[in-house]
Amino acid sequence: MNSEQDKTMELLTATTPLDMEIQHMEPLDRVNGFDVRPGFYMFDGATPIPRGVCFTVQSQGAVSCELLLYHRKESEPYAVIPFPDNYKIGNVYSMVVFGLNVEEFEYAYRLDGPYNPKEGLLFDKRNILLDPYAKAVTGQSTWGRKVSDDGYRARVVRNNFYWGTEVWPKIPMEELVIYEMHVRGFTMMDPGVSAPGTFEGIRQKIPYLKDLGVNAIELMPIFEFDELSDRRVVDGRELLNYWGYNSVSFFAPNTSYTSAVEYNREGTELKQLVKSLHENGIEVILDVVFNHTAEGNENGPFISFKGFDNNIYYLLTPDGYYYNFSGCGNTMNCNHPVVQRMIINCLRYWVTTYRIDGFRFDLASILGRNEDGTPMRKPPLLQALAQDAILADTKLIAEAWDAGGLYQVGDFPAFKRWCEWNGKYRDDMREYLKGGLWCGKYAAKRLIGSPDIYDPDIRGKDASINFITCHDGFTLYDLYSYNEKHNEANGWGNTDGGNDNRSWNCGVEGETSDPEVLHLRKRMIKNACATLLASRGTPMFLAGDEFCNTQFGNNNPYCQDNEISWLDWGLLKKNQDIYQFFRYMIHFRKKHPAIHGLCSPATCGLMDVSLHGVRPFEGDFGGDAKVIAAMFAGFDSKRKKDDIVYILINAYWEAMTVTLPTLPGDMKWSIAANTGEEGVGYHEEPVPVAQDKVLAGERSVMVLVGGHYLSTESGAKEP
């Protein structure tokens, strides 16, 4: 380490009263050949200390607890150390075991207690249980290959990663452009990456992400999960639990996403990725799954929570069965104080230890259900997360529905902190852009931040996460290539996946060589891109949409660890025009704060936001809105001038003449992007409009800017 690192590490190891207590602790007892003493009851999990390790777990129903120590990769424990009765305070067992080298062992627990399934009590001393607070999990460091059938075990992790003088980006939510990706699928087919399918693979793609312009990546689940849990073979192809929405351990990163084994240094490669992204101005959002676990229903395995306190960690029916609001067999009892505390501590851990910037909560409506499954008006977990001091700068994003029929888009208990995946934006924009003119009046609201759903006086201007595509459903290319889902490869007879896709194949189902169809598909993709990135609200899109990545019509490839889910980077060169259009629109959005809604009022007197139709200020759309348009205006404090943006969508199948709003003074309109014109569809230097009317081509989107323009030898330029 250099001198700066030495100085930092010296500060980190400075002596405190607690350090003094730890360093001068002596054994008080000897159990099964090991020197032990009562541990630190406030330290959950396994904590390395000088000369040993402190082990702390809790259970309300257990009557005894044993610590099992294993040599690495061995099936039988080399030591069984029962917690002495006097080492239990309340419901917490804590014990320091001296003489342990963290590099040399793995650990697990066995608990004994009452067994009464009808009351939800499933204690069985034969079950080997994973520490609920495990920071690293053994068994599957190589993707798709199970090392052992002896159950999950944990490793002790030394947290000594050097973050240096790293500064978090802390980008306002309204200014984010979120890029959703799967760690493995993002780089598995990229020949330019030396460690495909890993955190390191993403780190090597940072120059690409910067050039594209996104400033936040949202990683699909990276908590330790078992990709082999639903292993099947369909038509000779192995199918796995590829997406990872089946958490095994909430505190441990997925070890199979690293390019090298990190014994007792688990998380190092992920931390390096986060550090490098931050250095390049890109935030990291994790897709977290607290609504259920990999233990499944009454037929599922015993991994951890079932054996510690089944009736506390899960929502149970009166006869001891599992409520299934997640669609995955069980439902976490998120508002029980024990579970609530664990979730809060987990998120604090990821923020403080991994410097994570935000979390997207899968099926977040479950987090607001009471112990009997009913929705709560003020869920204590959601309120606690919203008001937690450590999470104060952290983005909290809810998928505001669950598999039990609870749909809360616009009604999620937000406590003035939570944002939401705006599922209505996706549905209304998909419908309108494909020609569903009846939906124009709703799409217009989505364009301006969905004020009918998110009252800006109550929710502010950052509540809506706008998206047209995400991991769940069609890619953007497939949205305009298929009328129907094609999930046969999943092995369920094409019965899985959503049926309400609101897609359009542009005249031919699937792949085609018809140049007119291909041209139309690309225009539709550009329409969706321009609309998303010029809408008020935070935009998010699926990785690969920027170069027409396809899943071949599969809208639910959760099990496809192959070219169906992996990004085909060869398409980037083939569809460079789409990539450049995405890149232009992302940078355009960043340049125009009026879209974000963060400006002070425009000095020219224009309203912050207004809706328009074929004629200006005709925003009361009926049931056949061929054209919808929105104007955003505000004072740009950085450029010391008014910023005015106008987006016009012609969803009709014929060209439409549209009258533009009159601008104050000598301001004029100029076209920045027009998907209806030949060529790239955008102008690096906006092209002035000669009159107050424009011809919007069939099925096209135009983006215009207003301002003062001076005629020069090189042409008209934006000031």
Image (cartoon, rainbow, N blue to C red):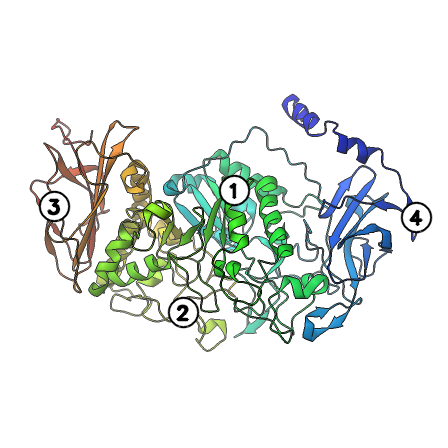
Q: Position of residue 630 (x, y in %)?
A: 21, 48
The residue depicted at 17 percent of the width and 58 percent of the height is: 621
* Spatial separation of the CA atoms under disc 3 and disc 1: 45 Å
In the rendered image, is residue 379 in sight? yes
* Mark 4, secondary structure of its residue: strand
Q: Which class describes the residues within 10 Å of circle 1: few (<14), some (14-19), or many (20+)? A: many
- The 10 Å Cα crowd at callout 2, few under 14, some 14 to 19, many 20 or more, is few
Question: Which amino acid type is marked by label 4?
Answer: Arg
The quadrant the C terminus occupies is top left
**For residue 644, what is the image quadrant?**
top left
Q: Which residue is labeled 3 in the image?
A: 660
Q: Amino acid at mark 2?
A: Gly
**Residue 192 position within the rendered picture, expressed as x and y whole percent measured from the top left:** 48, 46
Q: Name the N-terminal-most of marks 4 and 2.
A: 4
Look at discs 1 and 4 and give the one toward the viewer.
Answer: 4
- Dot label at residue 498: 2
Q: Secondary structure at mark 3?
A: loop
Query: Which of the pair 84/586 is nearer the observer?
Result: 84
Sequence-wise, the earlier of marks 4 and 3 is 4
Residue farthest front in this picture: 377
Quote the CA–CA distance across marks 1 and 4: 48 Å
Q: Nearer the viewer, mark 3 or mark 1?
A: 3
Query: Which residue is label 4 attached to?
Result: 30
